Amino acid sequence: MNKPTTNTRVPERNRENPAENKQFAAISPGPVKPPTACFLASDWRPLDKATLLGAFNLTLPSGLIIKGCTFHKSHNSYWVGLPSQSHKDKDGAVQWVNILDFSSRPARDSFQKQAMAAIEKLLRDGEGQ
């Protein structure tokens, strides 16, 4: 007596193979464009330990906030470090593990360029001091 029911609202769905349904088809985002917005550095905290000059937060154009970025100097080189986590190895020495990483060297270089511009602007303009 129980008849199978069908969904009459969307009869064109292929229930056997959902990948064939148009509504599930991949949508191409088109050509990838470089970001036009800038990174924004904030919440500068001066520190002085070896190469470390200080820590800050970095807001990306996507809205992602990376808290605990570090600003370093060694000889005449400056760079931005991403947050990392410390742990002790089997001998009790402190080691550091990256939490975030890049898929390629060009991606890392692009990030460094934009992050350096953001921290230089923050320090030059005195915002966050």
Image (cartoon, grey):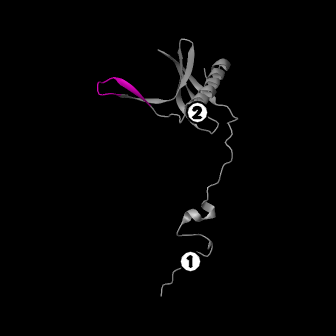
Question: Crowding near pointer 1: few (<14 within 10 Å), some, many (20+)?
Answer: few
- Name the one closer to the observer, 21 or 128: 21
Q: List x then y, in percent, for residue 69.
A: 53, 27
Whole-percent x, y for residue 87 in the image: 37, 29
Q: Is residue 74 above or below residue 122?
A: above
Name the residue that disc number 1 marks.
6
Note whether residue 127 is visible. no
Residue at image position (53%, 31%) is: 67
As drawn, which residue projects farthest toward the right?
36
For the residues carrying marks 2 and 1, which lies nearer the camera in this image? Answer: 2
Q: Residue furthest top?
A: 75
Choose top left, top right, bottom left or bottom right for residue 23.
Answer: bottom right
Q: Which residues are magenta?
A: 88-97
Residue bearing mark 2: 107
- Number of numbered labels in the structure image: 2
Give left or right: position of 72 versus 63. left
Quarter-wise, where is residue 26 in the image?
bottom right
**Element type where label 1 sits in the image:** loop
